[in-house]
Image (cartoon, rainbow, N blue to C red):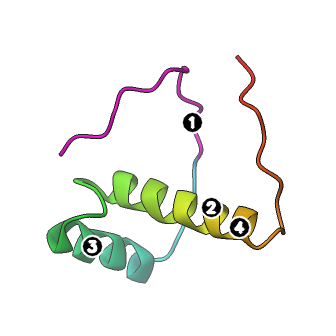
Amino acid sequence: MPRPKNRLPPAKVVITGTPKLATYLRDLVVEEGYGNTPAEVARTLLWRGIEDLIHRGVLTRRKVRR
């Protein structure tokens, strides 16, 4: 199922990792449910981590600035 369209313009975030990290991201593409590309998988995992930090009270949910 495709993800919904963004209501806001995307903000580019660049991460640098090891070849091992890239391999894990590609493995998760094959696994399904995380994303169709390594970049989508990275976005999904990053967002899940942020949601967890919000849930634990480490971060406060922010209103989106347009």
Q: Is residue 9 magenta?
A: yes
Q: Which residue is mark 3?
A: 28
Name the mark on residue 12: 1
> Splitting the image into 4 quarters, where does residue 21 fall?
bottom left
Q: Amino acid at mark 1?
A: Lys
- Tell me if 13 is positioned left or right of 35 in this view: right
Q: Residue furthest bottom?
A: 20
Circle nearer the viewer, 1 or 2: 2
Q: Amino acid at mark 4?
A: His
Q: Which residue is mark 2?
A: 51
The local secondary structure at tag 3 comes to: helix
CB within 8 Å, label 1 to label 2:
no
Q: Which residue is mark 4?
A: 55
**Residue range of the region highlighted in magenta in the rendering:** 1-13
- Spatial separation of the CA atoms under disc 4 and disc 3: 24 Å
Q: Of 18 and 27, which appears nearest the observer?
A: 27
Q: Residues within 10 Å of mark 1 (few under 14, many from 20)?
A: few
Going 22% across and 66% down the picture, which residue do you hit?
A: 29
> Splitting the image into 4 quarters, where does residue 25 fall?
bottom left
Q: Amino acid at mark 3?
A: Leu
CB within 8 Å, label 4 to label 3:
no
The local secondary structure at tag 2 comes to: helix
- Tell me if 14 is positioned left or right of 25 in this view: right
Q: Of 54 and 47, which appears nearest the observer?
A: 54
Circle nearer the viewer, 1 or 4: 4
Precedes in sequence: disc 1 or disc 3: 1
Name the mark on residue 21: none
Task: From the top left corner, tell me how far across and down residue 17 is, in percent.
Answer: 53, 70
- Tell me if 51 is positioned left or right of 36 in this view: right
Going 45% across and 26% down the picture, which residue do you hit?
A: 6
